[in-house]
Amino acid sequence: MAKLVVGYWPLRGLVERVLLLLEYLGLEYELRRVTDPDGWFNKLKLEVMAKNGLANLPYLLDGEKYICESSAIMVHLALKADRPCLLGKTNDEKVEYTALIGFFNDTYSEYIKFAYGKAEDFAAAKADYKKAVDLRVAKLDKLLEGRKYAVGETFTLADILFFDFLSLYEGLLFPGELKAFKTVQEYFERVGSIENIKNYRASDRFMVEPCNGPSAQFSPLKLP
Ligand SMILES: N[C@@H](CCC(=O)N[C@@H](CS)C(=O)NCC(=O)O)C(=O)O
């Protein structure tokens, strides 16, 4: 099997979900941090573009093939590992999975708006964001009642996405606050205790910060 190569800036951003999935699946990979923006925009991106018109970061290089768009990278990895159930097993799960991805994307867009906002008063912006995100976490709390994973019994890519997001919430944004949402907290602990995920997060392969690019107001990449 050709070695899988992942390329991304030296931050968590959109690559963290891809890394979580690679680790969950136990696939070997090389992570190439793109530390030179000029080198990316003026050289490497053009090389990727010659093979994939959607050239972007993160990219996945699988043999000769470049896959771009983080969601497509995740689907590619699930199928490559022969785990189509990661997109839902039954028809009901597939529909539920698609609904949850929509909900996740809205939740993540709201986070990006906050993270890259230019608030004069960061503490006030963070408090406003907390009110907004908590409405979403409360919704998730209700939704997860009686479920082992996001769609039910089957572990799916939605669990990778929610776990990544909740690890930002509990790990960096609002430490200790997840306890207000008992079902979500238990779910977060359940996913976090999956052997491969637990080992990855305890390893030096897991990057705690930065989460965002240099222009962010929350957890930005600090350039020298
Ligand atoms: N929809 C894309 C968004 C990719 C994206 O916005 N990448 C940002 C970093 S998070 C970037 O800097 N891309 C490099 C570029 O525009 O060439 C995905 O999910 O992969």
Image (tube, grey):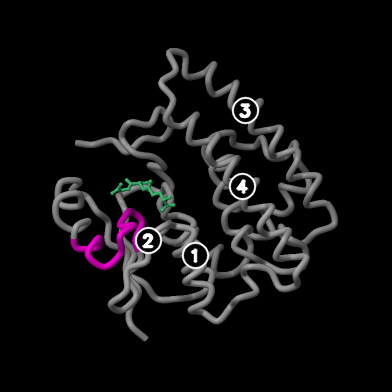
**Label 1 to label 2, Cα distance in Å?**
10 Å
Q: Which residue is mark 3?
A: 130
How far across and down, in percent of the image, does residue 78 sit?
53, 72
Mark 2 CB near ligand 1 (8 Å cut) = yes
> Closest to the observer: 75 or 53?
53
> Closest to the observer: 208 or 165?
165
Picture disc at residue 68: 2
Picture disc at residue 104: 4
Q: Residues within 10 Å of mark 3 (few under 14, many from 20)?
A: some
- Please report contact status of discs 1 and 2: CB closer than 8 Å, yes or no: no
Number of the front mark, 3 or 2: 2
Q: Which residues are magenta?
A: 47-59
Number of the front mark, 1 or 3: 1
Number of the front mark, 1 or 2: 2
Number of the front mark, 3 or 4: 4
- Please report contact status of discs 4 and 2: CB closer than 8 Å, yes or no: no
Q: Which residue is mark 1?
A: 74
**Label 4 to label 2, Cα distance in Å?**
20 Å
How far across and down, in percent of the image, does residue 87 sit?
63, 68
Task: Name which of mark 3 and mark 4 comes first in the sequence.
Answer: 4
Task: Name which of mark 1 and mark 3 comes first in the sequence.
Answer: 1
**Residue type, mark 2 in image:** Cys
